[in-house]
Amino acid sequence: MTIYPKLIEDALRTVRYPGNGKNLVEAEMIEDDLRIDGMKVSFSIIFDKPTDPFRKSVMKAAEVAIKTYVSPDVEVTINEKAKTQLPPEPEKMLPGVKHIIAVSSGKGGVGKSTVTANLAVGLAKMGYRVGLLDTDIFGPSMPKMFQVEDARPYAENVDGRDLIQPIEKYGVKLLSIGFFVNPDQATLWRGGMACNALKQLISEANWGELDYFILDTPPGTSDIHLTLIQTLDITGAVIVSTPQQVALADARKGINMYTNDKVNVPILGLVENMAWFTPAELPENKYYIFGKDGCKNLAEELNVPLIGQIPIVQSICENGDNGEPAVLSPGTPSGIAFMSMAAKLVRQVDKLTIEKA
Protein backbone atom coordinates (compact mmCIF):
# COMPACT_ATOMS: atom_id res chain seq x y z
CA MET A 1 0.00 0.00 0.00
CA THR A 2 1.21 3.49 -0.89
CA ILE A 3 0.33 6.29 1.51
CA TYR A 4 -0.27 9.76 0.09
CA PRO A 5 -0.54 13.06 2.00
CA LYS A 6 -4.16 13.40 0.84
CA LEU A 7 -5.07 10.16 2.64
CA ILE A 8 -3.64 11.49 5.90
CA GLU A 9 -5.34 14.85 5.45
CA ASP A 10 -8.73 13.25 4.79
CA ALA A 11 -8.35 11.10 7.92
CA LEU A 12 -7.49 14.15 10.04
CA ARG A 13 -10.58 15.95 8.72
CA THR A 14 -12.64 13.43 10.69
CA VAL A 15 -11.12 14.61 13.98
CA ARG A 16 -12.74 17.64 15.59
CA TYR A 17 -11.12 19.90 18.16
CA PRO A 18 -13.55 20.16 21.13
CA GLY A 19 -12.63 23.79 21.78
CA ASN A 20 -14.20 25.12 18.57
CA GLY A 21 -15.92 22.16 16.89
CA LYS A 22 -13.76 22.45 13.74
CA ASN A 23 -11.79 19.56 12.28
CA LEU A 24 -8.01 19.67 12.67
CA VAL A 25 -7.38 20.67 9.05
CA GLU A 26 -10.08 23.34 8.99
CA ALA A 27 -8.78 24.73 12.31
CA GLU A 28 -5.27 24.93 10.77
CA MET A 29 -3.85 22.82 13.59
CA ILE A 30 -1.73 20.55 11.36
CA GLU A 31 1.87 21.77 10.93
CA ASP A 32 3.38 21.68 7.45
CA ASP A 33 5.91 19.01 8.39
CA LEU A 34 4.20 15.79 7.27
CA ARG A 35 6.71 13.00 6.62
CA ILE A 36 5.83 9.67 4.99
CA ASP A 37 8.36 6.84 4.86
CA GLY A 38 6.69 3.67 3.66
CA MET A 39 4.20 2.78 6.41
CA LYS A 40 5.66 5.34 8.83
CA VAL A 41 3.92 8.69 9.17
CA SER A 42 4.94 11.66 11.31
CA PHE A 43 3.53 15.17 11.68
CA SER A 44 2.84 17.87 14.29
CA ILE A 45 -0.37 19.21 15.80
CA ILE A 46 -0.33 22.87 16.84
CA PHE A 47 -2.19 23.88 20.01
CA ASP A 48 -2.69 27.41 21.31
CA LYS A 49 -0.74 26.69 24.49
CA PRO A 50 1.24 23.81 26.04
CA THR A 51 -1.40 23.32 28.75
CA ASP A 52 -4.30 22.85 26.31
CA PRO A 53 -6.67 20.49 28.19
CA PHE A 54 -7.62 18.63 25.00
CA ARG A 55 -4.15 17.96 23.63
CA LYS A 56 -3.81 14.33 24.76
CA SER A 57 -7.30 13.30 23.66
CA VAL A 58 -6.92 15.08 20.28
CA MET A 59 -3.55 13.46 19.57
CA LYS A 60 -4.98 10.05 20.42
CA ALA A 61 -8.02 10.66 18.22
CA ALA A 62 -5.76 11.69 15.32
CA GLU A 63 -3.77 8.47 15.62
CA VAL A 64 -6.94 6.36 15.74
CA ALA A 65 -8.35 8.18 12.69
CA ILE A 66 -5.27 7.41 10.59
CA LYS A 67 -5.27 3.76 11.59
CA THR A 68 -9.02 3.56 10.88
CA TYR A 69 -9.25 5.43 7.57
CA VAL A 70 -5.80 4.75 6.09
CA SER A 71 -4.49 1.45 7.48
CA PRO A 72 -4.18 -0.22 10.90
CA ASP A 73 -0.57 -1.03 9.98
CA VAL A 74 0.54 2.62 9.81
CA GLU A 75 3.15 3.61 12.42
CA VAL A 76 2.04 7.06 13.54
CA THR A 77 4.28 9.59 15.31
CA ILE A 78 2.59 12.82 16.38
CA ASN A 79 4.57 15.75 17.73
CA GLU A 80 3.04 18.43 19.89
CA LYS A 81 3.65 22.14 19.27
CA ALA A 82 2.25 25.30 20.87
CA LYS A 83 1.74 28.82 19.57
CA THR A 84 2.59 30.34 22.94
CA GLN A 85 5.03 29.17 25.57
CA LEU A 86 4.37 28.94 29.28
CA PRO A 87 6.07 31.24 31.76
CA PRO A 88 8.40 29.48 34.22
CA GLU A 89 6.36 26.82 35.98
CA PRO A 90 6.19 26.57 39.77
CA GLU A 91 7.65 23.08 39.81
CA LYS A 92 10.79 24.49 38.19
CA MET A 93 10.90 27.07 40.96
CA LEU A 94 10.86 24.16 43.43
CA PRO A 95 13.89 22.21 42.25
CA GLY A 96 14.35 20.59 45.65
CA VAL A 97 10.89 18.98 45.79
CA LYS A 98 10.87 15.25 44.98
CA HIS A 99 7.19 14.31 45.24
CA ILE A 100 4.04 16.47 45.12
CA ILE A 101 0.95 14.84 46.61
CA ALA A 102 -2.55 16.32 46.22
CA VAL A 103 -5.05 15.31 48.92
CA SER A 104 -8.63 15.76 47.72
CA SER A 105 -12.23 14.91 48.53
CA GLY A 106 -15.34 14.95 46.40
CA LYS A 107 -17.23 16.93 49.03
CA GLY A 108 -16.64 18.78 52.27
CA GLY A 109 -17.07 17.39 55.75
CA VAL A 110 -15.33 14.06 55.22
CA GLY A 111 -12.21 14.98 57.20
CA LYS A 112 -9.84 15.66 54.32
CA SER A 113 -7.86 18.37 56.13
CA THR A 114 -7.55 16.19 59.23
CA VAL A 115 -6.18 13.37 57.09
CA THR A 116 -3.81 15.77 55.30
CA ALA A 117 -2.40 17.20 58.54
CA ASN A 118 -1.82 13.74 59.99
CA LEU A 119 -0.31 12.48 56.73
CA ALA A 120 2.20 15.35 56.68
CA VAL A 121 3.18 14.93 60.33
CA GLY A 122 3.32 11.14 59.94
CA LEU A 123 5.75 11.47 57.02
CA ALA A 124 7.88 13.88 59.08
CA LYS A 125 7.93 11.37 61.95
CA MET A 126 9.27 8.79 59.49
CA GLY A 127 12.21 11.08 58.80
CA TYR A 128 11.12 12.68 55.54
CA ARG A 129 11.42 16.39 54.76
CA VAL A 130 7.85 17.59 54.38
CA GLY A 131 6.12 20.75 53.20
CA LEU A 132 2.38 21.36 53.49
CA LEU A 133 0.46 23.97 51.49
CA ASP A 134 -3.12 24.75 52.47
CA THR A 135 -4.63 25.48 49.04
CA ASP A 136 -8.16 25.97 50.34
CA ILE A 137 -8.11 29.72 49.81
CA PHE A 138 -11.69 30.23 51.03
CA GLY A 139 -11.65 27.92 54.04
CA PRO A 140 -8.10 27.46 55.32
CA SER A 141 -7.92 25.17 58.35
CA MET A 142 -4.26 24.20 58.69
CA PRO A 143 -3.29 27.11 60.99
CA LYS A 144 -5.85 25.83 63.51
CA MET A 145 -4.84 22.21 63.14
CA PHE A 146 -1.19 23.08 63.81
CA GLN A 147 -2.05 25.64 66.53
CA VAL A 148 -0.25 28.43 64.69
CA GLU A 149 -3.19 30.80 64.02
CA ASP A 150 -1.20 33.75 65.36
CA ALA A 151 1.88 33.06 63.25
CA ARG A 152 2.78 35.62 60.60
CA PRO A 153 5.28 34.43 57.99
CA TYR A 154 7.91 36.97 57.01
CA ALA A 155 9.98 37.48 53.87
CA GLU A 156 13.71 36.89 53.83
CA ASN A 157 16.22 37.61 51.10
CA VAL A 158 17.49 34.36 49.57
CA ASP A 159 19.96 34.60 46.67
CA GLY A 160 18.66 38.04 45.75
CA ARG A 161 14.95 37.15 46.02
CA ASP A 162 12.57 38.03 48.83
CA LEU A 163 10.95 34.70 49.72
CA ILE A 164 8.23 33.91 52.25
CA GLN A 165 9.53 31.73 55.07
CA PRO A 166 7.09 28.90 55.84
CA ILE A 167 6.06 28.30 59.45
CA GLU A 168 7.65 25.12 60.84
CA LYS A 169 5.96 22.84 63.37
CA TYR A 170 6.12 19.10 64.07
CA GLY A 171 8.86 18.88 61.43
CA VAL A 172 6.55 20.23 58.69
CA LYS A 173 7.00 23.45 56.70
CA LEU A 174 3.57 25.05 56.46
CA LEU A 175 1.96 27.88 54.50
CA SER A 176 -1.69 28.88 54.27
CA ILE A 177 -3.64 31.90 53.08
CA GLY A 178 -5.03 31.81 56.62
CA PHE A 179 -1.80 33.44 57.80
CA PHE A 180 -2.50 36.52 55.70
CA VAL A 181 -6.26 37.19 56.10
CA ASN A 182 -8.56 38.01 58.99
CA PRO A 183 -9.83 34.65 60.30
CA ASP A 184 -13.18 36.19 61.27
CA GLN A 185 -13.95 37.55 57.81
CA ALA A 186 -14.93 35.70 54.64
CA THR A 187 -12.44 35.72 51.76
CA LEU A 188 -14.49 37.20 48.89
CA TRP A 189 -12.16 36.71 45.94
CA ARG A 190 -12.90 35.83 42.34
CA GLY A 191 -11.31 32.67 40.94
CA GLY A 192 -8.45 34.47 39.18
CA MET A 193 -7.41 36.36 42.31
CA ALA A 194 -7.50 33.18 44.40
CA CYS A 195 -5.41 31.29 41.86
CA ASN A 196 -2.82 34.08 41.72
CA ALA A 197 -2.55 34.07 45.51
CA LEU A 198 -2.02 30.32 45.43
CA LYS A 199 0.71 30.58 42.78
CA GLN A 200 2.47 33.16 44.94
CA LEU A 201 2.49 30.80 47.93
CA ILE A 202 4.07 28.15 45.71
CA SER A 203 6.63 30.12 43.75
CA GLU A 204 7.56 32.91 46.18
CA ALA A 205 8.19 30.80 49.28
CA ASN A 206 11.43 29.30 50.53
CA TRP A 207 10.37 25.64 50.55
CA GLY A 208 13.94 24.38 50.19
CA GLU A 209 14.72 20.67 49.87
CA LEU A 210 11.64 18.48 50.38
CA ASP A 211 10.90 14.79 49.99
CA TYR A 212 7.14 15.37 50.05
CA PHE A 213 5.13 18.51 49.23
CA ILE A 214 1.55 17.90 50.39
CA LEU A 215 -1.33 19.94 48.94
CA ASP A 216 -4.50 20.20 51.02
CA THR A 217 -6.95 20.99 48.21
CA PRO A 218 -10.47 22.44 48.53
CA PRO A 219 -13.39 20.00 48.50
CA GLY A 220 -14.96 19.19 45.14
CA THR A 221 -13.53 20.38 41.81
CA SER A 222 -12.71 24.04 41.21
CA ASP A 223 -10.41 26.63 39.62
CA ILE A 224 -7.90 25.85 42.36
CA HIS A 225 -7.63 22.24 41.25
CA LEU A 226 -7.17 23.26 37.61
CA THR A 227 -4.44 25.71 38.60
CA LEU A 228 -2.58 23.04 40.56
CA ILE A 229 -2.92 20.45 37.80
CA GLN A 230 -1.81 22.82 35.04
CA THR A 231 1.14 24.36 36.87
CA LEU A 232 2.56 21.61 39.08
CA ASP A 233 3.99 18.23 38.21
CA ILE A 234 1.80 16.34 40.68
CA THR A 235 3.17 12.90 41.53
CA GLY A 236 -0.23 11.52 42.49
CA ALA A 237 -3.45 12.15 44.37
CA VAL A 238 -4.99 10.77 47.55
CA ILE A 239 -8.80 10.77 47.73
CA VAL A 240 -10.53 10.98 51.12
CA SER A 241 -14.12 9.85 51.68
CA THR A 242 -16.41 8.38 54.30
CA PRO A 243 -18.05 4.97 53.72
CA GLN A 244 -21.40 6.67 53.11
CA GLN A 245 -22.80 6.21 49.60
CA VAL A 246 -23.52 9.92 49.07
CA ALA A 247 -19.87 10.71 49.85
CA LEU A 248 -18.61 7.88 47.63
CA ALA A 249 -20.60 9.24 44.68
CA ASP A 250 -18.66 12.51 44.94
CA ALA A 251 -15.40 10.64 45.52
CA ARG A 252 -15.86 9.01 42.12
CA LYS A 253 -15.98 12.46 40.54
CA GLY A 254 -12.80 13.45 42.35
CA ILE A 255 -11.06 10.32 41.08
CA ASN A 256 -12.25 11.00 37.54
CA MET A 257 -10.94 14.57 37.69
CA TYR A 258 -7.40 13.25 38.15
CA THR A 259 -7.52 10.12 35.98
CA ASN A 260 -9.30 11.34 32.84
CA ASP A 261 -7.24 11.66 29.65
CA LYS A 262 -6.99 15.45 29.91
CA VAL A 263 -5.25 15.33 33.32
CA ASN A 264 -3.78 11.85 33.83
CA VAL A 265 -2.61 12.13 37.45
CA PRO A 266 -2.38 8.69 39.11
CA ILE A 267 -4.40 7.90 42.22
CA LEU A 268 -1.99 6.81 44.94
CA GLY A 269 -4.76 5.63 47.21
CA LEU A 270 -8.15 6.06 48.85
CA VAL A 271 -8.53 6.86 52.53
CA GLU A 272 -11.74 5.83 54.27
CA ASN A 273 -12.23 8.32 57.09
CA MET A 274 -14.80 7.72 59.84
CA ALA A 275 -14.66 4.04 58.87
CA TRP A 276 -16.16 2.99 62.20
CA PHE A 277 -16.73 4.33 65.69
CA THR A 278 -14.58 2.98 68.50
CA PRO A 279 -15.35 4.07 72.09
CA ALA A 280 -12.25 4.89 74.13
CA GLU A 281 -13.37 2.54 76.91
CA LEU A 282 -14.00 -0.32 74.42
CA PRO A 283 -11.17 -0.07 71.88
CA GLU A 284 -11.89 -3.50 70.40
CA ASN A 285 -15.49 -2.61 69.49
CA LYS A 286 -16.40 -1.25 66.06
CA TYR A 287 -19.69 0.43 65.19
CA TYR A 288 -20.21 1.15 61.49
CA ILE A 289 -22.20 4.37 61.71
CA PHE A 290 -21.82 5.42 58.05
CA GLY A 291 -21.81 1.95 56.53
CA LYS A 292 -19.11 -0.68 56.22
CA ASP A 293 -16.22 -0.88 53.74
CA GLY A 294 -17.65 1.69 51.31
CA CYS A 295 -14.20 2.98 50.27
CA LYS A 296 -12.74 -0.51 50.33
CA ASN A 297 -15.35 -1.70 47.83
CA LEU A 298 -14.87 1.40 45.67
CA ALA A 299 -11.10 0.88 45.66
CA GLU A 300 -11.54 -2.71 44.51
CA GLU A 301 -14.01 -1.66 41.83
CA LEU A 302 -11.72 1.05 40.41
CA ASN A 303 -8.51 -0.94 40.99
CA VAL A 304 -6.86 1.68 43.18
CA PRO A 305 -5.15 1.04 46.53
CA LEU A 306 -6.92 1.54 49.86
CA ILE A 307 -4.17 3.07 52.00
CA GLY A 308 -6.10 3.84 55.15
CA GLN A 309 -9.23 3.20 57.23
CA ILE A 310 -9.42 5.79 59.98
CA PRO A 311 -11.82 5.19 62.90
CA ILE A 312 -13.99 7.82 64.57
CA VAL A 313 -12.33 8.43 67.90
CA GLN A 314 -13.13 11.40 70.11
CA SER A 315 -9.44 12.17 70.54
CA ILE A 316 -9.05 12.92 66.80
CA CYS A 317 -11.45 15.85 67.11
CA GLU A 318 -9.92 17.02 70.36
CA ASN A 319 -6.38 16.79 68.99
CA GLY A 320 -7.36 18.70 65.86
CA ASP A 321 -8.98 21.49 67.85
CA ASN A 322 -5.94 21.66 70.12
CA GLY A 323 -3.52 21.81 67.19
CA GLU A 324 -1.93 18.42 67.94
CA PRO A 325 -2.51 15.91 65.10
CA ALA A 326 -3.58 12.48 66.36
CA VAL A 327 -0.59 10.82 64.68
CA LEU A 328 1.55 12.31 67.46
CA SER A 329 -0.14 9.91 69.92
CA PRO A 330 1.58 6.55 69.28
CA GLY A 331 -0.22 3.45 70.46
CA THR A 332 -3.71 4.93 70.10
CA PRO A 333 -6.10 3.53 67.45
CA SER A 334 -6.03 6.80 65.52
CA GLY A 335 -2.26 7.23 65.83
CA ILE A 336 -1.65 3.70 64.56
CA ALA A 337 -4.11 4.17 61.67
CA PHE A 338 -2.54 7.45 60.52
CA MET A 339 1.04 6.11 60.69
CA SER A 340 -0.02 3.05 58.71
CA MET A 341 -1.60 5.34 56.11
CA ALA A 342 1.62 7.38 55.78
CA ALA A 343 3.73 4.23 55.39
CA LYS A 344 1.41 2.85 52.69
CA LEU A 345 1.56 6.14 50.81
CA VAL A 346 5.37 5.97 50.77
CA ARG A 347 5.19 2.44 49.36
CA GLN A 348 2.80 3.57 46.60
CA VAL A 349 5.05 6.50 45.67
CA ASP A 350 8.11 4.22 45.59
CA LYS A 351 6.22 1.74 43.41
CA LEU A 352 5.14 4.51 41.02
CA THR A 353 8.71 5.84 40.83
CA ILE A 354 10.01 2.39 39.86
CA GLU A 355 7.30 2.00 37.19
CA LYS A 356 8.23 5.36 35.64
CA ALA A 357 11.95 4.60 35.62
Image (cartoon, rainbow, N blue to C red):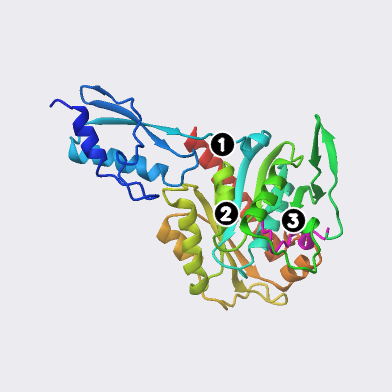
Residue 338: which numbered mark, if any? none
Element marked by disc 3: helix
Q: On screen, 6 above or below 58?
A: above
Look at mark 2 in the image and give the residue it sits on.
225
Amino acid found under the numbered disc labelled 1? Leu
Residue 15 at what x, y percent from top left?
28, 44
Q: Which residues are magenta?
A: 135-148
Q: Residue at x 52, y 73 (%)?
A: 244
Q: Amino acid at mark 2?
A: His
* Residue 3 image offset from top left, x and y in percent: 18, 27
Tell me what residue is drawn at x 67 percent, y 61 percent.
113
Residue at position x 84%, y 35% from top? 157
Q: Nearer the viewer, residue 342 or 356?
A: 356
**Which amino acid type corresponds to the residue marked 3 in the rendered image?**
Ile
Spatial distance from mark 1 to mark 3, Cα to Cα? Answer: 25 Å
Residue position marked by numbered label 3 in the rendering: 177
- Circles 1 and 2: CB distance less than 8 Å? no
Q: Which residue is mark 1?
A: 86
Element carrying mark 1 = loop
